[in-house]
Image (tube, helix red, strand yellow):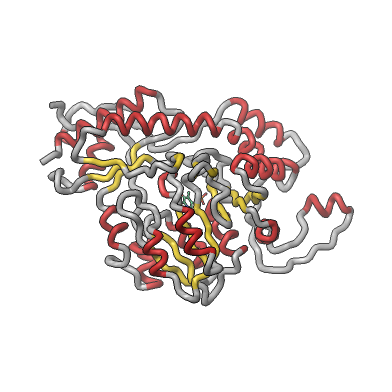
Amino acid sequence: MADLAIEGGKPVRKNPLPYGRQSVDEEDIQSVVAVLRSEWLTTGPKVGAFEEAFASAVGAPHAVAVSSGTAALHAAVYALGVGPGNEVIVPAMTFAATANCVVYQGGTLVFADVDRETLLIDPEQVEKKITSRTKAVIAVDYTGQPCDYDRLKALTDRRGIKLVADACHALGGAYKGHPVGALADLNTFSLHPVKHITTGEGGIITTHDATFAQRMRVFRNHGITSDHRQREASGGWHYEMVDLGYNYRLTDIQCALGLSQLRKLPGWIARRQEIARRYDAAFADLKTIKPLVVRPDVSHAYHLYVIALDPDRLRVKRDAVFAALRAEGIGVNVHYMPVHLHPFYRKRFGTGPGLCPVAEEAYEQIISLPIFPGMADDDVDDVIAAVRKVVTAYAV
Ligand SMILES: *Cc1c(COP(=O)(O)O)cnc(C)c1O
């Protein structure tokens, strides 16, 4: 067997492969250049055009573009009226921003544990955590697999609790034939370069509720009810700030890029799914690692491809496997340290180990492999070769 690169052997790759990377082509570049030559660099016609195209791509009537996925989450919990005294249930296995947005608004965070096989929020755990103060549940479509929205909606709807989908991983996915973006009361997306489509930084929220959409448009513009372009059109100067908002606007430069990127989404999703199928097939015979379970009623958007190590069949821990794969030139990553284990949450809210044991145990075992549409088949083969090489060398 070949020697591991971490022990001085020859690495599978010389040039490291990242875990995710944007695809930007000449058409994208030209669409941005055209805006730079135009009258409106921000709050112009591209914002509405991007919102309309995005809403129609996910089958929702309204989309509100904002400056990041984090701003999208903040706008969503604001639109729901989350504030002091309201509890919001959030899965432990997610990026910190999913929880931070509740803290921004002074709401009370309640962490729910995840399902062992999918690492998606566990509806049974959600039900246990619901109280008379629960205002909302934020479900996270972790890795790009939509959560069990039928079960979550059954739990929330009859109690008057709102459901937010943090769909930052899942643009282009579907649940029982319904596209992600039309599944929850509010659905949030990130347009960061590592996500499915990018505007550099950016975010967007989709909803069926016109009132929520209007509140979020005001929120992203300082809490002011009219924007610069609307005032120019009406010839007036007067405006009113009706609530405390932020400058969370997305520029026309960015929206032009978003429009151009959105056209390529179906092909990119197909490529992500194809890479995932190749990984699935290549790892099927390995006992040392297991990909996360994908339920049959979903179309997985594969923002991430996560494998779980079997600690009983390996003689080293996750961090050693991680370091060995990095040494082979594979840009593996870990998504995520459970939010309640971060120092801020421990200090501020006294959270810590034991609160969500399934997420905590999974965290010790997971590794994200590279997956992005620009990966060539040779790149996929390198990842497969490196994973097989490393886990075989470390197998008990
Ligand atoms: C990326 C991401 C966010 C935040 O998006 P930004 O655009 O980076 O602010 C929030 N939640 C999840 C699950 C994400 O993956």
Above or below 311: residue 390: above
Horizontal and vertical percent for residue 379?
A: 35, 26
Q: Quadrant of residue 239?
A: bottom right
Residue 221 coordinates in the image, percent (x, y): 69, 58
Evaluate whether residue 45 shows in this view.
yes
Q: Is residue 66 left or right of residue 159?
A: right
Q: Is residue 71 visible?
A: no
Residue 311: x %, y % from top left:
18, 48
Looking at the picture, does residue 146 appear above or below residue 356?
above
Figure check: 85 above or below 67:
below
Q: Quadrant of residue 331?
A: top left
Q: Nearer the viewer, residue 217 or 55?
A: 55
The residue under the point 54% across, 57% down is 73
Quarter of the view holding residue 237: bottom right
Front in this rendered view, residue 124 or 9: 124
Q: Residue furthest left?
A: 396
Q: Residue at x 41, y 29 (%)?
A: 274
Residue at 84%, 51% in the rendered image: 232
215 with respect to 169 (left or right)? right
**Position of residue 63 in the picture relative to residue 91 (left or right):** right
- Quadrant where the N terminus is found in the figure: top left
Image coordinates of residue 81 in percent, x first then y, are: 60, 68
Residue found at x 65% / y 60% = 212
- In the picture as drawn, the residue positioned furthest to the right comes out as 235
- In this figure, what is the number of numbered marks? 0
On-image quarter of the C terminus: top left
